[in-house]
Image (cartoon, grey):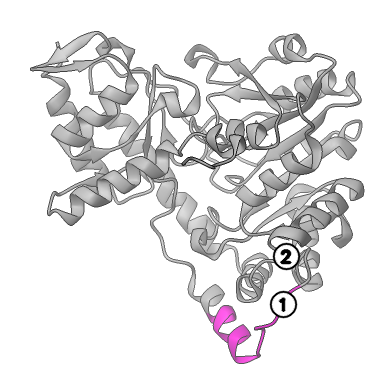
Amino acid sequence: MNQLSERLRSLSISQTLAMSQRSSELKAKGVDVINLSVGEPDFNTPEHIKEAAKQAIDDNFSHYTPVAGYLSLRQAIAKKLEVENQLSYSPEQITCANGAKQSVCNVMMALVNKGDEVIIPAPYWVSYPEMVKLAEGTPVIISTGIEHDFKITPAQLEAAITPRTKALILCSPSNPTGAVYSQKELAALAVIIEKHPNLIVVADEIYEHINYIGKHQSIAQFPAIKERVAIINGVSKAYAMTGWRLGFLAGPQWLVSACNKLQGQYTSGPSSVSQKAAEAAYTSSQAPVQEMCAAFERRRKLIISLAKEIPGFELSIPEGAFYIFPKCDAYFGKKAGDTCINDSSDLALYLLDQAHVACVAGSAFGAPECIRISYATSDENITEAMKRIKEVVKNIN
């Protein structure tokens, strides 16, 4: 008897996690798999952050925490936003959660009514449409192309807005494409947003510090729309703290209060130890962040040079995050032996089975003509993986 809710049955399984699991299963069987499917820095959490967590345990930070997070952490985040982003938020306008992922979902659940529309530019992070569906909203997908570096235009945004539009989710730097919106591009979008006073912007800035073109630009910088922007960020990517599960929302007081009300009923406050570690991340030396970003930039240069040698791969040069997102539909409709390559899912499985390289089909991100390849791994892994891919695609014809 299937008694699962319609809500659950409407959701899709995360293809990024599914591919990572499949590669782990092959590794367990002794197959030498290079996993380029995960969106996770391969670095360890910096030592001073780990020491802060150990100290927190010794100091008995082992009790329930405030739903919004410790005041000291929210003060540290407010200071970070002021110093790094020139944005003014009080600690009461900030709430912490179990990762930026929960922060995004909190906003969706707090904002969206049944039938409300949420605009999502594609390619998108796999979970955005699923979160909207979970809130019984309707994802409205704006397709972007490699010719525009996978960024939406003001005209596209204007055309997608209807009386039912509740929110726009904007991710910069982007997962999966690495696209970064410039200040000029954001300003043009802000003009459209200003014209629609009921539109809330959910600005996912989790890759803020993995940026190769200079200072990060937040859409919250424009005064006319700042009170309608929900900034989502956290420590996972910049500080190599994915497992610590600590993210935050900074935004208008009414929305933060609503998310606190929601979170208070289903998870309560995030981990005490993770919060003290995050506080150290924001208030201590940022040198490890800069070192990791420099490594990612070196890897980006390496993987781009190698990807350009693979026939059938068309690239947009990523300006942030740690992914390339090559267009690879030149292989679709062709065969490798008895294997038919009809779409990016077939190609991703072929690369896993034949090259033992795990990547993710672009269909998971709303761009079925592409695949996502993470370069959050060593130079040696990148070089070997791209060599393997180059070898096996020769057999597709």
Q: Residues within 10 Å of mark 2 (few under 14, many from 20)?
A: some
Residue 258 position in % (x across, y down): 85, 50
Q: Which residues are magenta?
A: 51-65
Question: Label 1 near label 2: C-beta < 8 Å?
Answer: yes
Location of residue 169 (image quadrant):
top right
Task: For residue 336, say whether it is visible.
Answer: yes
Count of numbered circles in the view: 2
Three-letter code, disc 2: Ser
Front residue (pair 340, 322): 340
Task: Identify the residue at image location x=90%, y=35%.
Answer: 223
Where in the figure is residue 249, as x and y percent of width and height? 75, 51
Instruction: State the residue at coordinates (59%, 80%).
Output: 52
Task: Left or right? Give the position of 267 relative to 380.
Answer: right
At mark 2, the secondary structure is: loop
Question: What number is the disc on residue 268?
Answer: 2
Q: Earlier in the sequence, mark 2 or mark 1?
A: 1
Please name the amino acid that badge 1 sits on.
Tyr
Who's the residue at 80% across and 38% down the image?
Answer: 111
The correct choice, above or below, for 125 with respect to 189 in the image is below
Query: Could you say which is closer to the camera, residue 220 or residue 103?
Result: 103
Answer with left or right where residue 244 lies relative to residue 301: right
Q: Quadrant of residue 19?
A: top left
Residue 56 is one of the magenta-drawn residues: yes
Up-down relation of residue 243 to residue 188 (above or below): below
Q: Which residue is the site of mark 1?
A: 64
Q: Residue at the location (78% across, 53% down)? A: 262
- Helix, strand or loop at mark 1: loop
What is the crowding at mark 1: few (fewer than 14 residues within 10 Å), some, or many (at least 20)? few
Single out the residue that lies furthest toward the front.
1
